Image (spheres, coloured by chain):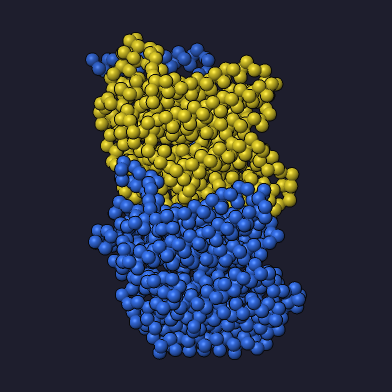
Chain colours: A blue, B yellow
Amino acid sequence: MSMEQAGVLIIIPAAAFVLVALFHKVLPRQGDWIVVLALAAVVAIGMLVVVDFQRVWEHGEFVPHGANRFAFDWVNIHQGVFQIEFSTYVDSITAVMIVVVSIVALMVAVYSVGYMHGEARYGWYFAALSLFVTAMLTLVLAGNLLMVYFAWEGVGVASFLLIGFYWERQSAAEAAKKAFITTRIGDVGLLIGIVLLWRASGTFDIQEIIKIAQAGGFDHTYLTVSMLFLFLGAVGKSAQFPLHVWLPDAMEGPTPVSALIHAATMVVAGVYLVARMMPVFNEVPIAREVVLYTGLVTAVMAATMGLVATDIKRVLAFSTVSQLGFMFVALGLGAVGIAMFHLFTHAFFKALLFLGSGSVIHATHQQEVGYLGGLRKKMPITTVTFIIGSLALAGVMPLAGFWSKDEILHATMEHAPLTVFLLLAGSAMLTAIYSTRLVLLTFFGEPKDQHAYDHAHESPWLMSVPLLILATLATVSGFVVFHGVGTALGFPGGIGEVIFEHEPEVFHFNAMFAAGAVGSSLVGIAIGYIYWGGTAERATRALSWAPELHQLLLRRYYIDEMYQAIIDRVILGLASVVSTFEKRVVNESGIDGGAQLINWFGYRLKFLQTGKIPNYALAMAIGVITLAVLAFRSE
Amino acid sequence: MSASEGYLMVSLFAIPLGTALLLMLVPSRERGAIMAVTGLSSLVLFILSVYLFARYDYTSQEQFQGVVAWDWLQNVGFLGDHGIQLKVGMDGISAAMVLLTGIITLAGTWVSWKIQHRTKDFFILLYVLIAGVYGTFVMLDLFFFFLLYETALLPMYLLIAVWGSTRKEYGAMKLMMMLVAASILIFTAVFAIFTEANLGTFDMTKLFGAHYDPRMQKIFFPMIALGCGTLGGMWPFHSWSPDGHAAAPTAVSMLHAGVLMKLGAFGIIRLGFQILPEGAAFWAPGLITVGITAALYGAISALRQTDMKLMSGFSSVSHMGYVFMGLGTLNVVGMTGSVLQMFAHGVMTALFFLLIGGMYDQSHNRDLPNFSGMAKQMPIWTIFFVLGGLASLGLPGLSGFVAELHIFVGAFRVYPVVGGLAVLTAAITATYLVRMFAQAFFGEFNPRWNALRDITWTERAGAGVLALSMLALGLWPSPWVDRIANTLARSIPGVSL
C-alpha cells in the first residue's frame, strides 16, 4: 500500500461507520467486531503506508507535493477560480499521526468491548467511534486546509456525540454542549484564517501556501493576522488557555473515549495543525511567540489545577491540557520534531493512564479519589501499568515521557528566555507531584470507601491486554528516536531522523541535562510521596494550609464562572435587547403600528362621508370657489 | 435539453393545477382517493424535478434550455409581436430551485396526509400554491412570472387562517398584508421594466438584453429588492416570517420556508440582477449590509426564543440573511453560495418544520423548557433533528456548509470584516442549536411526555428524503455548483469571477 493510496485509511472506518450506524440493531453483537476488524485493518494498512513513506524518504526521493499525493476536485468553479480539492498528503508528520491514531484507536476499541459491555446503545457507541476515527484520519491525511476544516468539524461532532453518550445525565448533556460551543469559537478563527489565506493566495493547498509564504508572497501583517486566526482554532481544539475550559468537563464521556479523543488524538489536532503549518509560522515570528506563550501559560496553569482535582479523570484531563501546553512551547520555538515526538509518546502513556483509570472506574464505580485507595492488592495489572504510565508522565528515565519532555526542556533552555525555561521546568516538577498524588491516593494507602473496595476486582482480559500493550509502548516508544532502534524495527532510515527532519540539529542527548531533569522529577515524586504518602488526613492538608489558594485552584481560577457570567449577562443580555427591539420597534411600532395608523386614518376619514346633502353641497361650493379663484389669478 | 424537456416544464405547473382540479371532483370523505391522487402527483413531480435538474446541460453556451413558447396576446394596445406568451425554459438557478420544489412537495404531501380537518380543501390550496411556485421558477415571460408569483402567495392566507394554530388569524393577516404590499412594488417595477425596454413584449429573454437607463435601474432595483426581499424574509421586513411560520400548519411551513421564501430571493436574481445589473451593482453594498445585519439579528434573536417554531423562524431570517449577503458580493463564488444557500436552507428548514410539527401535533406544546430527555421517547425524531441542526450550524458534510463556505469566501473577497462577522454568526447559530439539543433532547426524561410516540412512517419517509438531500449536497456539491456558477457568470453582466 503506497502513500498515494492512503485514502483507503479513511474509507475503511467510514464504511464501518455506515454499516454499524444503520444496522447495529440487527448485526450480531451489535457490530462491535466490524469496528474492531476495521481498526485492525487500519493499523495494518497504516503501517504499510508509513513503511512506504520511509522507503521513499530513505532513497531521498521524497518531494513535497510529489507522488505522495492524491487529489480530486470537490468543487471547481471556472477552472480554478474557486477550487476545492480533496487531497491526501503523506509526510513525516502524517506518518507519526497515522501510527498514533491507528494504534490507540485499535487499543481503545478492544478495551471498549470489555468496558462498554452491557451498556445501552452499545452499537451506537462503536458507530460513533468509527465516525471519529474516519474524521481523525481524514484530518491527518489532509493535503488541503479546507479538508482539514472538514475533518476538524467532523472530529468535533464525534466528540460531541461521545461526550454526550450518557445524555440522560444532565451533566453529560451540559459538558457536550460546552465542548461543542467552546471549540466552535476556536473554529470560527480557523475558518477565518483559512479563508484569509485563500484570499491572498487563491489556493487551499497547504504545500502551495507554504511555497507562497516562503517566497514572500503574502503581506507580512496580513499573514500574521491570518496565522493568529488559524492558531485560534488550534487553541480551541487543543484546549489551550483561554479556551481550555471544555476539556475537564468532557470527562463526562465514557472513559475509553476520553483516552482516544480527549488525550491521544483529537486534542492534539491543534498541535498537528501548527506543526503542519510551521513553515508559514516561521515567516511570522510574532505568531510563533503567541504560540509559545499560550503553551507556557497553559502548561503551568493546568498543572496547578491538576494538583487539587479530586476526580481521577479530571486530574488526567488537566495533565493533558498541561502536556499539550508543553507541545505548543516546543512549536513556539519552531521545534516541530520535538513537539511531534512528545505528541507521540504522550499519546501512549496518556491513553494508558486513561484506560487504567477506566479500569478502576469499571471495578469500583467510583472516580473520586476521596473514595478510592488501596486498590493495588485487588488490581495488580492495573496498578503496575498505571504506575508505568505515571512515571512516564512524570518524566522518569528511561520511560517514553522522559525522552520527549527532556527534549522540550532542553530546547527551551537553549532558545527561550530563562524565565520560560524555569516556569516550564517548574511545571514539569508539578507534573511529577500530581501524578504521584494520583497513584498514591488511588492504589495505595487504606481504602476510603469499603464498599467500593469490596466491589473491586481486576478487569477482564479484553481490558488488561490493551493496558499491557500500551504500557509496553509507554516504556519503549521513547527509544525509537535512536537510529539503532529504528533500523532494528525495520525502518532503514531510522525513525528519529524522519521525525526530526525539520530541525537543524537531530535528536541529541545531553547526559548532564538529563540527570538534572530526572533529578527534578524524582524530587517531585518525593514531595508527592511525603505529602500524600501517609494517612488520609494528610491529603487534605492543603485545605488548612492555604484555603484561598486551594479554593482558587479547585475553582479553576474562576475562569469558568467568568465565562458563564459573560454568557448570561452580556450575550443573553444582548439577545434580550434584540428581542425587545424586535417586539416593540419592528412589530408593535413598525408593522402593527403601520396597520393601526391606516386604521386610524380610515376611522377619521370615514366621517367625511356623512350622507347629509348640506355637507356635500358645502364641500362642492368650497371646491368651485377655490377653482374660480385659481382661474382668475392665473389670468 | 431540447423542446421536449420544455413540455415537461409546462407539466411542472400543469400537473399540480390538474391535481387541484381533480381533487375538486373527489368526494371529501374519500380520504384514500385523496391520498392516492396527491401521492401520485407528488411522486411524478419529484421524478420530473430530478430529471430536469439532471438534464440541464451546464457546459452548453445556451443559457435558457428547453425553451418553448405559445403566444397569448400580441399586437393589441401597447403590446407588440409576442407581447405576452406562455414561455418556459430553465437556467442553472431555476434547475436547482425546481429540484428543491420537487423534494419539498414530496415530503410536504406525505406529512399532510394526517390532516383530518377539511383534508380535500387543504390539498387543493396546497397544489395551487405548488403550481404557482413551479411556474414562477420556469417562466420566461414577465407577465406570467408575476401572475404565478401571486398565485403562489394567495393560498397562503387560507392555509394559515383555516388550518393553522397559535394566533393564526393574526399571523395569516400579517403575512398577507406585508406580502401584498410588497407585491405592489414588484408590480410597479415590472411595468417600469416593460416601458423602459420599449420592446412591446414581456418576453424575458428579450428583456435581459435590453437597454435600461442607469438612473432608472438605480431607482427600480431597490423596489424589486424590497418587494421580492419581503417574501424572502429580508430584514427589517421579516417579521411576518416568525409569526407566519409559528401559525402555519406543518406542510405549509415547510413549503413556505422551504420554497416560497426562495421565490423572493429568486425574484431578486431574475428581475433585479439579470434585468437591471447596473442597479444591482449600485445597491450591492446595501444588500450586503442588510444581509449581515439579518444574519446576526436573526441568530441573536433565536438565542432568546423558547418556542421551537419561533426559534426556527428567526433562524430562517438569519439564514436568508446569508442569501442576500452572498448576492451583494457581486462575485460568482458568493452568488453561487446564495443560490446554494437557498437550496440548503430550503431542505433544512423544511426538515425542522416537519419535525416540530410532528411533535406539536401530539403534545400541543412547542415550548423548549417543557421538554427534556426526548431522545429517550423519540429517538428517530431526535436523530433527524440533530442532523438538521448540524446542517443548520454549517457542519461540513451537510448542505449548509457548502453554501455558507461559498458565501463566506465571496464576502471575504470584498469585505473581510463582513466575512468575519458571517463566520461568527455561524458560531452563534451553533450556540442556540446546541443549547436546544441539550435542553430538549438530552437530560433526564420528563415523564409528562410518556404518551408521545416517535414520528410516523410517512414522517420518517419525508424526513429521510430531506436528510438525504442535505447529505447529497454536502458531500457532492459539484452538480449544484457547476449549474449555478456557470449560469451566474454568463447571465449577469458585471459579475466578477
- Residue B261 horizontal side relative to residue A165, left or right: left
- Which residue sits at x=38%, y=58%? A89
Which quarter of the figure is the N terminus of chain A placed in? bottom left
Closest to the observer: A523 or B154? A523
Closest to the observer: A510 or A539? A510
The quarter of the picture where residue A90 lies is: bottom left
Tell me: residue A332, above or below residue B26: below
Tell me: residue A149, above or below residue B67: below
**Residue A71 horizontal/vertical position (percent):** 37, 51
- Which residue sits at x=43%, y=34%? B96
Tell me: residue B112, above or below residue A34: above
**Residue B178 horizontal/vertical position (percent):** 48, 32
- Residue B286 horizontal side relative to residue A182, left or right: left
**Residue B474 horizontal/vertical position (percent):** 47, 45
- Which residue sits at x=38%, y=13%? B71
Q: Can residue B367 be seen in this view?
A: no
The quarter of the picture where residue A439 lies is: bottom right
Closest to the observer: A66 or A289? A66
